[in-house]
Image (spheres, rainbow, N blue to C red):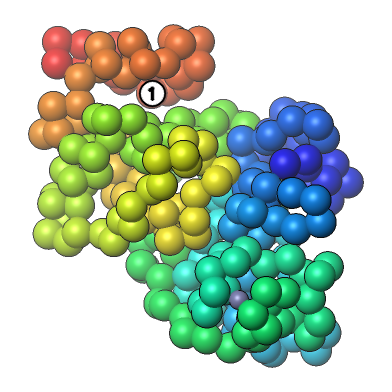
């Protein structure tokens, strides 16, 4: 996809360092432009917001990977037509109807968000507005560093043959199994995930970083999530320092 540099410009220095309009950006969801249509579910929407807007409009936040919920209505954002499964293509639709089957995006079922995912995304959003953020409670870190840590945690929870055991360990520790719709084998990139997948990641990450770093260490040990695997699968320079430091110190023998 190409990022609309103007739309996301205010996030430079906060969510990301720069925007390359010709390349993919880590936190901007892919919409998969193909001719005049879209193939990826990167534009999310809240049916309740659209329904209650005087003039319905698509929020900038709905294109970001840090969002899978509507913070106002507490529901999981939609990302595909509930009838035919096509992504939203607003410039090809009238009155917010699906361009393919005509179903209105203002209607359809909505699902209540997981409360911890919702709270966590509230923090992710407040960081964009200048509030202090950190993976460690009561501390604050530069937002760029904070979002880099979260992106790394999201990625290793989502992808790779070893991620499943860690997801299960986090779920089990709460006696709750989060819905994890299967990820299509051609989805290997965070920006191409569905809102349901990202919602599960937000819920899992909220629990994984609680009491940082001890719960993270304990759950990685439970999941036999070997640190040597992580450092083999990832360039050490790509691993955020906060995670690397903890992994090197506490999970190395694992
Ligand atoms: Zn809403
Ligand atoms: Zn449709």
- Residue 193 in the image: state x and y as whole percent: 49, 49
Note whether 169 is above or below 177 in the view shown: above
Residue in the foreground of this view, choosing between 69 and 128 = 69
Q: Is residue 99 visible?
A: yes
Note whether 226 is above or below 219 in the view shown: above
Q: Residue at x 60, y 66 (%)?
A: 86
Note whether 162 is above or below 78 in the view shown: above
Q: Residue at x 41, y 71 (%)?
A: 113
- Residue 197 in the image: state x and y as whole percent: 41, 54
Q: Residue at x 78, y 42 (%)?
A: 3
Residue found farthest to the right: 6
Q: Is residue 70 visible?
A: no
Q: Which residue is mark 1?
A: 243
Question: Which picture quadrant has residue 175?
Answer: bottom left
Question: Which picture quadrant has residue 43?
Answer: bottom right
User: Position of 252 compared to 54: left or right?
Assistant: left
As helix, strand or loop, the secondary structure at mark 1 comes to helix
The quadrant the N terminus occupies is top right
User: Position of 5 compared to 189: left or right?
Assistant: right
The quadrant the C terminus occupies is top left
């Amino acid at each position: 996809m190409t990022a609309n540099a103007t739309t996301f410009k205010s996030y430079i220095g906060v969510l990301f360092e720069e925007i390359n309009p010709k390349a993919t950006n880590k936190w901007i969801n892919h919409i998969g432009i193909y001719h005049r249509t879209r193939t990826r579910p990167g534009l999310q929407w809240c049916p309740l917001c659209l329904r209650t807007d005087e003039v319905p409009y698509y929020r900038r936040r709905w294109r970001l990977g840090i969002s899978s919920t509507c913070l106002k209505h507490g529901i999981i954002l939609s990302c595909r037509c509930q009838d035919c499964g096509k992504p939203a293509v607003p410039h090809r639709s009238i009155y917010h109807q699906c361009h393919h089957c005509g179903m209105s995006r203002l209607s359809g079922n909505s699902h209540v968000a997981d409360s911890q995912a919702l709270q966590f995304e509230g923090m992710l959003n407040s960081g964009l507005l200048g509030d202090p953020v950190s993976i460690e409670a009561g501390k604050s870190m530069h937002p760029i560093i904070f979002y880099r840590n979260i992106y790394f945690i999201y990625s290793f929870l989502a992808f790779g043959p070893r991620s499943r055991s860690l997801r299960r360990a986090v779920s089990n520790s709460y006696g709750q199994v989060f819905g994890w719709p299967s990820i299509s084998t051609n989805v290997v990139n965070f920006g191409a995930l569905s809102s349901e997948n990202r919602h599960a990641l937000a819920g899992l990450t909220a629990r994984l970083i609680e009491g940082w770093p001890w719960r993270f260490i304990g759950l990685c040990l439970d999941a036999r999530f070997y640190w040597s695997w992580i450092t083999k699968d990832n360039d050490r320079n790509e691993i955020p320092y906060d995670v690397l430091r903890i992994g090197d110190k506490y999970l190395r023998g694992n």
